[in-house]
Image (tube, rainbow, N blue to C red):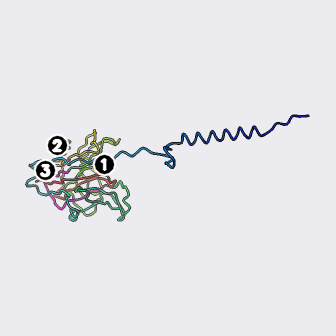
């Protein structure tokens, strides 16, 4: 007669293994420091980098300039003109705001979406010859610059010079370019391959225009120089970037 195997020991063994598994789970689950604590604990996010003080404005520029803007008050932008240099829909126009006494490019449209559209904010002044100087601090945008001798109501049908700088992390080259734009057609006047500017620190860019000669400087050092055989006439000046957000401008100065 076959011997019958009792199932009681098997059930007891299974219950014991289940109890051990539950105990191990409770003992080693991540972040369980105490009764009622969170199951998962993530490391704290690093604090946002502190934006240091602006570069000091040379005494020679602090007296007798043609135009100065330090963006100290909320109404500082009332006389400035925002222009998209690429075609965009009206609802996707760039936003500019004053943030703690500095000019900030604040994305595009009511939803504040990032946009690759090139944009400029034009100062309420014009020049034929002179120097436009501005400090900038890049948080995550990566593109900064200035425009000069700007003429036109619609950006992609306008005429202007643009000094365009890229941060060093971008793979694209050249990192620095001085260009002439006429009705959307770009003519490079001078370029420098690299290294690109460092983000999250203040820089100063200058574009000097004298007759048909253009000279660009970064942080006080000569960057490039070019001659334009058919120079543009007098026009407005302003800051330049893309509507990606994450970039600050300050101490905008136009000198004769």
Q: Distance between the Cα atoms at labels 1 and 2?
A: 21 Å
Residue 216 placement (x, y as % from top left):
19, 45
Q: Is residue 24 above or below residue 54?
A: above
The N terminus - image quarter: top right
Q: Distance between the Cα atoms at labels 3 and 2?
A: 18 Å
Find disc 2 in the rendering and name its residue. Answer: 220
The first of marks 1 and 2 along the sequence is 1
What kind of element bears circle 1? loop
* Residue 155, quarter of picture: bottom left
The first of marks 3 and 1 along the sequence is 1
Question: Of 32 and 66, which appears nearest the observer?
Answer: 32
Question: Of 44 and 134, which appears nearest the observer?
Answer: 44
Viewer can see residue 86: yes
Residue 139 placement (x, y as % from top left):
31, 48
What kind of element bears circle 2? loop
Question: Of 47 and 206, which appears nearest the observer?
Answer: 47
Question: Does the magenta segment cover residue 145?
Answer: no
Find disc 3 in the rendering and name its residue. Answer: 210
The magenta segment is: 118-134
Compared across the picture, whether 165 is left or right of 38 comes to left
Asked if marks 3 and 1 touch (Cβ < 8 Å), the reply is: no
The C terminus - image quarter: bottom left
Label of residue 139 in the image = 1
């Amino acid at each position: 007669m076959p011997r019958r195997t009792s199932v009681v020991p098997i059930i007891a063994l299974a219950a014991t293994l289940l109890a051990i598994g539950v105990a191990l789970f409770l003992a080693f689950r991540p972040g369980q420091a105490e009764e009622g604590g969170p199951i998962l604990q993530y490391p704290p996010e690093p604090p946002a980098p502190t934006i240091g003080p602006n570069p000091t404005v040379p005494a020679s520029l602090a007296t007798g300039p043609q135009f100065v803007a330090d963006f100290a008050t909320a109404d500082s932008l009332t006389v400035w003109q925002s222009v998209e240099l690429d075609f965009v829909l009206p609802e996707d126009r760039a936003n500019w705001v004053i943030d703690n006494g500095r000019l900030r490019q604040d994305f595009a449209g009511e939803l504040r979406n990032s946009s690759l559209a090139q944009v400029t904010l034009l100062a309420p002044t014009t020049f034929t010859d002179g120097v436009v100087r501005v400090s900038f601090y890049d948080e995550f945008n990566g593109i900064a610059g200035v425009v000069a001798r700007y003429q036109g109501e619609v950006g992609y049908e306008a005429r202007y010079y643009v000094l365009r700088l890229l941060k060093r992390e971008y793979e694209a080259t050249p990192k620095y370019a001085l260009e002439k734009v006429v009705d959307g057609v770009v003519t490079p006047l001078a370029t420098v391959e690299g290294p690109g500017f460092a983000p999250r620190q203040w820089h100063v860019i200058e574009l000097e225009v004298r007759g048909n000669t253009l000279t660009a400087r970064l942080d006080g050092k000569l960057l490039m120089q070019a001659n334009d055989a058919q120079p543009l006439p007098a026009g407005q000046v302003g800051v330049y970037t893309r509507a990606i957000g994450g970039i600050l401008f300050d101490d905008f100065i136009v000198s004769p």
